[in-house]
Each structure stands twice: as structure tokens, then as C-alpha cells.
Image: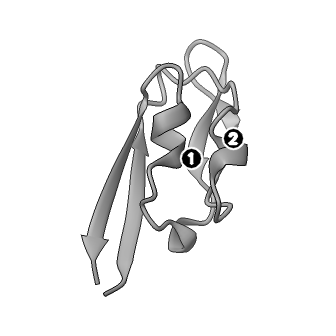
Amino acid sequence: MAIKGAITVDTEKCKGCGVCIPNCPTGTIALSKEVNSKGYNYLYMANPENCTGCTNCATVCPDAVITVYRVKI
């Protein structure tokens, strides 16, 4: 049974520290070129088709701004 993952990011609270990026085994996430109201580049799903819902990004996020969802396909 395959699992498809997805994340949501609270872009206003994300400070673009990038701690999550090297912890993503599938290269799904990246920092946006756009900035939030505080001037930080925020996290987004650059390659959403790659996400497996492993939760590594949410686990290491120091500000807990990432929510991971999993759907069986």
C-alpha cells in the first residue's frame, strides 16, 4: 500500500532557518524566493509529488510550523 504525503506550512511563522531541508529524504521542500511579512523566505513544497509523509521536516522544525498529512493511495 502506497502513501502520499503533503505538508502545510504556517508561512507567517516560518523564519526560513532551513533545518528541515536536509532532513527531507525525497527533496520535496525548499525555501521560497518570496518572503513573508517579517521578511523571511518561508518553506514550501517544491516537488509535491515526491512527498511520502515521513514527518522528518515537522519533527526537526524548531518552531513547529509544519503539519504533515498522509493519504493511502
Residue 8: x %, y % from top left: 39, 45
Q: Nearer the viewer, residue 67 or 14?
A: 67
The quarter of the picture where the N terminus appears is bottom left
Q: Is 6 on the left or on the right of 63, as rendered?
A: left
Residue 5: x %, y % from top left: 40, 65
Please name the amino acid that badge 1 sits on: Tyr
Please name the amino acid that badge 2 sits on: Leu
What residue is disc 2 on? 31
Q: Which mark is residue 64?
A: none
Q: Residue at x 46, y 68 (%)?
A: 52
Task: Examine the image and state in which quarter residue 37 appears.
Answer: top right
Q: Is 50 on the left or on the right of 30, as rendered?
A: left
Count of numbered circles on the image: 2
Residue 32: x %, y % from top left: 67, 41
Identify the colour scheme used: one colour
Circles 1 and 2, Cβ within 8 Å, touching? The answer is: yes
Q: Secondary structure at mark 2?
A: strand
Q: Residue at x 52, y 47 (%)?
A: 56
Mark 1 is surrounded, within 10 Å at the Cα level, by few (under 14), some (14 to 19) or many (20 or more) other residues, namely some
Task: Examine the image and state in which quarter residue 21 appears.
Answer: top right
Q: Residue at x 36, y 84 (%)?
A: 2
Q: Secondary structure at mark 1?
A: strand
* Vertical relation: 22 (above or below) 59: below
The quarter of the picture where the C terminus appears is bottom left
Residue 40: x %, y % from top left: 66, 21
What residue is disc 1 on? 44
Q: Residue at x 53, y 43 (%)?
A: 57
